[in-house]
């Protein structure tokens, strides 16, 4: 049994003790929380006979990396024959009568990062297995360690090095890694990755979701070389309710866990020194007068995290975010969240967005619209989006793909939810621009759903109490021009986030400015997390006041009516239209107006602004925000 599995057994054995740490010393709490955080390992059936991916180290770009992006040889495997043929072994004929019915040589190649659907016409709607192969040369010094890090692979990944299985990972939008120190040989080495994006009934998301199922190795792949003992992780953010006190930790990995640890912020003359304990964990606690991060002042500090064997350089900002009564406070001042929903897609390429240039296009549109925040729907987007938004002064809503028809009672599903939440939080916990963790979207009410989301919320709050937590619900009742928001599950979240499509899926029953609100849970901030309607750019078919026209004018009127309705919501703290740009969704089957696209975007798939864009831009411009 490998080390990761041993720790997983210990974690499961102590699980109940971890849930009640309120009266324990802070150092003990931090140690226990890190045991949960560090070991993000299991497979879909939670079997200890499986080999698990390791939790990914933080801040990969600051490490000693060898990038493995570029062309990878591939075998397309629609029948799954590669499993029993064991293509990862790359067998060669030995006798004259031998033949092998597969080969990477002579076949196609695909770009990594990138989805396979947009790179080959015959794979446009493919959901199944593609085998990837990369050969690399490496000479590893005996006092060094080597890790193979994946930004994300959608959805199931089996990873082999030199013909041997390293392990598996499930989940298409979060990073994972394997240590390959003892798996590589001097000189030439081969990586083979079996990628499968087939939808699973017990997957996350499940079988039905309203976006394109881009498969493949969709984010960066790197080799990361470290010393025998190195800084694997850290959390350096302001303590909840504080604008000047940092409270966090640094975690070491390796054979020297007892070390001097130092945090330096040269611009503030901060030089905090501490020591790690027997578990390699060092508690961080210091104060300063920070120039706080905000949309108007996206201030980031150079942070140097150092131990005796390693140094990591970061850029970190400091800000406070909290819900107080029915207000959201950024740095102690009320803020209205002028948001927009974004899918991780470059519509003009009809492909998964994966690069910094892709992120710049999408975030520049959001900034031009007047947004101070983006909701990255409905899964964690690539790290370029998170870091660039932070630098541009755009707050971020981070979300896991617990979506609609998920089967909460199916074996292993809640474990997968837990893993994806931890991987998201682990990657983005030092990004001050991230102010909301979102744990689900439009899930069907049931006792199993309620129990699963309540437990997941509690776990998320234990991991990170500094941010706001929400789940999005859309089961409100609209009758006699009264919107009844009845779900008491909102009691467990910091924000009431609700999706409503009045004017599109649900007709208005009276004047939008006369609508009444009846909230079962009162005294919390309210966010309209989705609203809108579809329009084909340039459409002038039929009457402009009929939805079936798919006209820009009809969509424009929806936005005008929604803006009128917003004035009726006493505790409204933000709105997030659905959505920034048209995006691919095979379930949208109207051959003239949709043709496989969700047309609710304010921007077309060619980058053209629809009329509703200007309504929202005017509304955001009229809001006099503290930030």
Image (spheres, rainbow, N blue to C red):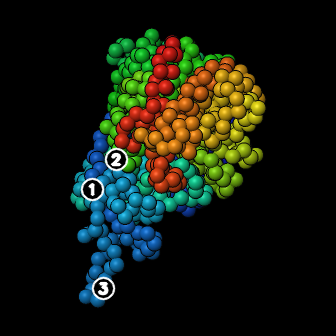
Name the residue that disc number 1 marks.
71
Q: Judge from the rendering whether residue 441 lies leftward or rightward of residue 365; answer left or right.
A: right
Q: Secondary structure at mark 1?
A: strand
| Res. 98 mark | 3
Residue drawn at point x = 42 percent, y = 36 percent? 603
Q: Judge from the rendering whether residue 287 lies leftward or rightward of residue 301; answer left or right.
A: right
Residue drawn at point x = 67 percent, y = 26 percent? 511
Please tell me whether mark 2 or mark 3 is closer to you in this view.
2
Q: Mark 3 and mark 2 in contact (Cβ < 8 Å)?
A: no
Name the residue that disc number 2 marks.
349
Q: Position of residue 447 (x, y in %)?
A: 76, 46
Please tell me whether mark 2 or mark 1 is closer to you in this view.
2
Mark 1 or mark 3: whose residue is earlier in sequence: 1
Q: Position of residue 336 (x, y in %)?
A: 55, 19
CA gap between label 2 and label 3 equals: 44 Å
Mark 2 or mark 1: whose residue is earlier in sequence: 1
Q: Position of residue 16 (x, y in %)?
A: 70, 41
Q: Secondary structure at mark 2?
A: loop
CA gap between label 1 and label 3 equals: 30 Å
């Amino acid at each position: 049994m490998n080390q990761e599995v041993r720790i997983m057994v210990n974690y499961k054995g102590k699980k109940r003790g971890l849930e009640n740490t309120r009266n324990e010393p802070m150092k003990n709490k931090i140690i226990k929380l890190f045991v949960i955080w560090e070991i993000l390992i299991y497979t879909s059936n939670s079997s200890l006979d499986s080999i698990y991916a390791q939790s990914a180290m933080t801040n990969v770009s600051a490490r000693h990396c060898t990038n493995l992006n570029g062309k990878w040889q591939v075998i397309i495997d629609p029948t799954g024959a590669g499993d029993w043929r064991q293509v990862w072994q790359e067998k060669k004929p030995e006798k004259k009568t031998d033949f092998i019915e597969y080969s990477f040589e002579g076949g196609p190649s695909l770009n990594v990062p990138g989805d396979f659907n947009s790179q080959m016409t015959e794979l446009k709607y493919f959901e199944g297995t593609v085998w990837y192969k990369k050969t690399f040369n490496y000479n590893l010094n005996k006092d060094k360690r080597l890790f193979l890090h994946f930004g994300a692979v959608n959805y199931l990944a089996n990873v082999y090095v030199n013909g041997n299985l390293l392990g598996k990972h499930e989940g298409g939008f979060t990073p994972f890694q394997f240590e390959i120190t003892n798996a590589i040989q001097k000189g030439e080495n081969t990586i083979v990755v079996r990628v499968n994006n087939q939808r699973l009934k017990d997957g996350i998301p499940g079988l039905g979701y309203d976006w394109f199922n881009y498969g493949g190795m969709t984010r960066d792949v790197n080799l990361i070389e470290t010393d025998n003992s190195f800084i694997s992780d850290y959390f350096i953010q302001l303590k909840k309710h504080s604008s000047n006190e940092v409270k966090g930790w640094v975690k070491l990995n390796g054979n020297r866990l007892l070390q001097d640890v130092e945090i330096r912020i040269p611009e503030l003359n901060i030089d905090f020194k501490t020591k790690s304990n027997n578990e390699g964990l060092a508690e961080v606690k210091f104060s300063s007068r920070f120039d706080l991060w905000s949309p108007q002042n996206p201030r980031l500090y150079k942070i140097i995290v150092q131990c005796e064997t390693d140094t990591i350089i970061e850029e970190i900002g400091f800000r406070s975010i909290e819900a107080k009564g029915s207000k959201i406070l950024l740095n102690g001042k009320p803020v209205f969240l002028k948001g927009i929903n974004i899918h991780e897609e470059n519509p003009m390429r009809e492909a998964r967005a994966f690069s910094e240039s892709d992120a710049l296009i999408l975030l520049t549109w959001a900034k031009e619209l007047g947004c101070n925040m983006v909701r990255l729907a409905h899964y964690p987007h690539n790290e370029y989006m998170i870091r660039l938004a932070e630098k541009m002064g755009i707050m971020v809503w981070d979300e896991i793909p617990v979506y609609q028809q998920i089967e909460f009672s199916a074996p292993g599903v809640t474990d997968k939810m837990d893993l994806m939440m931890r991987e998201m939080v682990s990657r983005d916990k030092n990004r001050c621009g991230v102010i909301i963790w979102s744990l689900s979207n439009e899930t069907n009410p049931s006792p199993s759903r309620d129990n699963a989301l309540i437990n997941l919320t509690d776990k998320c709050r234990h991991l990170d109490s500094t941010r706001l937590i929400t789940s999005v619900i859309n089961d409100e009742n609209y009758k006699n021009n009264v919107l009844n928001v009845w779900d008491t599950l909102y009691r467990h979240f910091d924000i009431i986030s609700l999706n409503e499509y009045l004017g599109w899926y649900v007709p208005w029953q009276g004047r939008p400015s006369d609508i009444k609100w009846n909230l079962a849970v009162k005294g919390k901030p309210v966010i309209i997390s989705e609203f809108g309607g579809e329009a084909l750019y340039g459409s002038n078919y039929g009457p402009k006041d009929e939805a079936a026209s798919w006209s820009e004018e009809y969509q424009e009127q929806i936005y005008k009516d929604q803006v009128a309705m917003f004035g009726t919501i006493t505790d409204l703290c933000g709105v997030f239209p659905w959505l920034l740009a048209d995006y691919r969704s095979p379930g949208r089957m109207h051959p003239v107006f949709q043709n496989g696209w969700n047309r609710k975007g304010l921007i077309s798939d060619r980058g053209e602004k629809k009329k509703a864009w200007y309504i929202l831009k005017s509304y955001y411009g009229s809001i006099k925000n503290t930030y």
